[in-house]
Amino acid sequence: MREGPRPRRGNADEVEQFARAFQRALPEDYKRLAKAAGTDIRTGARWDEVHITLNGARGPLNDVRVRQAIQHAIDRKAVATAFGKDLPVQLKTYGSHFFMPNQAGYQDNSGKYGTYDTAAAGKLLDEAGWKLKGDTRAKDGKQLALTYTLSSGSTSAQEDQAELIQAQLAAVGIKISIKKVPSNDYFAKYVTIGNFDLVSFRWVDQVFRSEAYPIYRQAAGKNLYENYGSVGSPEIDALLKQAGEITDPTEQAKLYNQADTKIRALGHSIPLYQRPQVLAVRSNFANYGAGGLADDAFTKVGWLKE
């Protein structure tokens, strides 16, 4: 599921109203709510990942070496630190497209492409023919210039992230222009039809790995499925199909991790950090809050006796 409003069912609506819970995990929300009387801050680790998708279907990003260079040029730790500096939890980078660090089966498949290494980025760009001309790289008389598409409804944290990525890529000679587009058009006219170079959004609540199949399978012409950057391979498709057909969780995890290694090498997308749950809940409201990977047990939710 992409970032956006999530439908809730049954009495969860009532619970959320009474619990005064806030799911946005923004530093400004936390600092305000942490001081509210009678409030508990409850934290958890949900399946919620922030990433950057690279569009391999057009322009310079069509070259896998450019995508790999961008992986090296982005300091993921710095991005996570910047977002989490005022939150009550420490954000950490992670290295999987299929598992969160608090899930069985998780392993870090970042490999060499997960390392922040501007020298390696420069070498890959040189090999791809993009040579430094002053502060920006160029090839055949054209600058290495890309756009980072951002919704006009983005939070301050999302805007800060875009500017940080812009500065990090400028350090290796890649010019990034931040392009703000109307919120209502962001997915329909840009992301889902592959009309971008770089975008960042969230995939949430993918606790079943098979849900990720359309994100990483090869696009079929104009049918991108959910692989908006059109980066994939027959090998990845075969591994994901095989993984979806077996029930043994250990063997399934092995196949997903094999696929993940290939996804990382192709420069499909860059996992940044697992976004935390930070909720403000009335302190006398029990068994409700940041459940992480667990479901809320509403039969156990209620007010404490005074």
Image (cartoon, grey):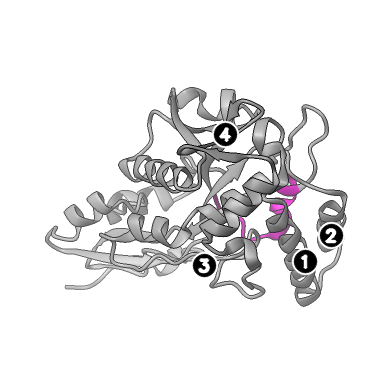
Query: How would you rate the neighbour count of disc 2 (Cα within 10 Å): few for under 14, some for 14-19, many for 20 or more?
Result: some
Residue 215 colored in magenta in the image: yes
Residue shown at 58% from the left, 63% from the top = 114
Q: Which residues are magenta?
A: 203-216
The CA span between labels 2 and 1 is: 8 Å
- Comparing 211 with 78, the one in front is 78
The CA span between labels 2 and 3 is: 28 Å
The CA span between labels 2 and 4 is: 34 Å
The CA span between labels 1 and 3 is: 27 Å
Name the amino acid, label 1: Gln
Name the amino acid, label 3: Ala
* Residue 48 in view, yes or no: no
Q: Which residue is mark 1?
A: 258
**Image position of 289 with respect to 144: above or below:** below
Query: How would you rate the neighbour count of disc 3 (Cα within 10 Å): few for under 14, some for 14-19, many for 20 or more?
Result: few
- Comparing 202 with 135, the one in front is 135
The answer to which image quadrant residue 159 occupies is: top left
Q: Which residue is mark 3?
A: 294
The answer to which image quadrant residue 62 occupies is: top right
In the rendered structure, find residue 144 and report the number of the disc placed on it. 4
In the rendered structure, find residue 200 and report the number of the disc placed on it. none
**Mark 1 / mark 4, whichever is N-terminal:** 4
**Mark 2 / mark 4, whichever is N-terminal:** 4
Q: Which residue is mark 2?
A: 239
Secondary element type, mark 3: loop
Query: How would you rate the neighbour count of disc 4 (Cα within 10 Å): few for under 14, some for 14-19, many for 20 or more?
Result: many
Residue shown at 76% from the left, 77% from the top = 250
